[in-house]
Amino acid sequence: MTNDTQNVTKVKKQTKNKIRVDFERTSLWQRLKIKYLSLRFIGRVIFVIFRIVLLLGISYIILYPFISKIAGSIMSPEDFADVTVALISRNPTLDTYKAILEHNSFMDAMADTALLSLLCALIQTFSCCLVAYGLAKYKFRGNTAVFFCVILTMIIPHTIIQTQMQQHFAAFDIGMFGKGLIRSVFGGMPLNLINTNWPLMILSITAMAFKNGLFIFMLRQFFKNIPDELEESAYIDGSGIFRTFFQIILPLSIPMLITVFLFAFSWQWTDSFYVSLFYLDKTAYQSFTNVYAIPQPFVEAIGKAGGSAFRAAIQNTASLMIIAPLVVVYLFCQRFLVQGIERSGITG
Amino acid sequence: MTKVLSIFRKSDAKAPRRKSISLDRKKARAGWIFVLPFVIGFVLIYIPMIAESLIYTFTDVTATSLKDGIFSIKAVGFDNYQEVLFNHTDFVERLVSGTTQLIIDIPAIIIFSLFMAVMLNQKMIGRAAFRAIFFIPVIVTTGIIAKTDLATQSTTSEMEGGMESGNEAQQSGGVSQIVSAADFGALFSNMKVGGELQAYVVDIINNIFNIVNRSGVQLLIFLAGLQSISPAIYESCSIDGASAWETFWKITFPMISPMILVNAVYTVIDSFTAASNSVMSFIQDVLAGNSANYKASYGVTMAWVYFLIVIVIVAVVAGILSTYIFYQRKET
């Protein structure tokens, strides 16, 4: 009953449709006190500060190498000899960039790598998509066995079969120890695929290139989360299996496809393992490995004081120039990266 | 005409059953068509390569001309393994140190990426920017870039050590020595924990750059896992008065535990290709023929020995983790 007396409201004005009442509110000061002086709020503030400091700190750790690389890239050889120069150059210069551009066949390497990465990434995205969709949506005998094989290709690293890979593509045939099926039937010389794009293309088409097992795993989870009713209704409307796949499923999974494409593209871009395995001739493929060489004008300066720091700076500059296109691609695609992953709902 | 025909067929007693079988078959065939590229590649290219590689470890291959595919193979049984494991101490040393490093790194990467995923999953200002920054290493610091980073870091730290014995401010290169062991010793001495843990934490913090770089994909997988937890569960928890701490351990952790297994396995596998993997780079040197006192078949053998050890680690990790994993039953 006491409640009633407290909550009694004074009717200020009453018309036919509206009523205005006046009731007692706790004062502003009281409300603020309750809201902001509680233990919960203080804990929250401390947590938010802790979180922002931590995230900023780790962001700094991630970004610092880039900052220091950029700082080092515009330094001149004299700066490295000067002990007082730490991060900011005394006589900034763009000579390092120019030298790498002119002397290290940077543009050739860029063109070759861009073409190869684009091809590989497109093919890998497509073939992984096919395999993952087949594994996710169709129950056929051997489904689990095929998935097990996919996992197997993921866990056996290509580094341990690199010699065999090189040999197989140097004398490409179906078979072992150079005794191939095709050659024993039709005869002829072994097919040498080294120094062509074919080894990586074949690995990409068969979804066995670098970390394709991971892509298939991710895509399979994604497709499993797409409700079956979607395809069933498409089938009922008379769409075939492949038409459903291309016209209904693929447009739905664009964020995920971009994620996979981004991974495939950037991992192929920075790859040195496969490139060194399959391209033995510089004229066939100019890899980024050669960009790291010390440019001709700087060979002299390397021997002087601060030379090893200068050498490191030159290599870091080369790294920067290699990753610059990647960073641009990433900035455009990163929105999709998180989006695709979020929608995938990967669960064990 | 065809329509009439199909109606006619449907009236047939046998036809409906045959049709349902053929739909199943059609679907199964479609499934096979989808996975066909992989199956062809796996059977025709991958299995021969793996088998050949395994056979190499039991033979003495003297390649007259490897490029043309002319070999002379002599079976030697387990001689290669014996030679590699017992007569070459430097490989075994590297193997032991590399494996220990791997075991140290797994929990660090898992804990770090889980922690960061939980952080990045919360609503806050600049979340998109932080996420973008955190995924930069996955895209950019891989392969040749990571290798060069590692090389330049080691040269600059050597140089610093030679010049001023560590007191000099670093000139360029990566982050080295963020904290010293002494600072942490002071902190930990009050907490009554062993020196091993202290050494471990100092090691991790000095390696933080490496760990951040290697936990990108794991972070993504954890984020995806966190996104798939229904918000309704959290809501009911907060109504029941659970604190954030309790919610994490009672809800988030069990729900994310399958992801922990996936990530642990992925971390181990991924460490093969990590630039900082000293064992693998050693084996690659041998395989490339840069080490004079190793035959080509030793390199393959070493790779398989290392792989088997890592597989055992994966099995042990998976075995331990799978007892703690909570699988949510999906109601149908």
Image (cartoon, coloured by chain):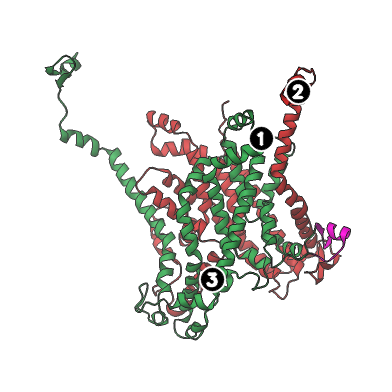
Q: Residue furthest front?
A: B1
In the image, is residue A175 part of the stretch drawn in magenta?
yes
Is label 3 in a helix, a strand or a loop?
helix
Q: How many marks?
A: 3
In this view of the protein, can residue B94 be seen by the observer? no
Residue type, label 2: Leu
Left or right of B120? Residue A263 is right
What residue did someone put label 1 on?
Answer: A240
In the visual, does B65 lie left or right of A23? Answer: right
Vertical arrangement, residue A129 with respect to residue B199, above or below? above
Q: Which residues are magenta?
A: A174-190
Element class at badge 2: helix
- Per the rendering, the colour in which chain A appears is green
Q: Give the colour of chain B.
A: red
A151 vs A294, left or right, is right
Give the amino acid type for the residue marked by disc 3 in the picture: Met
Q: Along the horizontal axis of the image, is A290 left or right of B191?
A: right
List the single residue furthest toward the left: A12
**Residue placed under numbered mark 3 in the picture:** A107
Which quadrant of the figure has residue B160? bottom left
| Residue displayed at 20% across by 36% down | A32
| Image coords of residue A217 (percent x, y) | 61, 45
Relative to the observer, which residue lies in front, A61 or B90?
A61
Nearer-the-camera pick, A122 or B49: A122
Nearer to us of marks 2 and 1 is 2
Q: Specify few, some or many for label 2: CA neighbours under 10 Å numbering under 14, 14-19, or 20 or more.
A: few
Q: CA distance from mark 3 to mark 1?
A: 46 Å
Q: Position of residue A205 (x, y in %)?
A: 68, 53
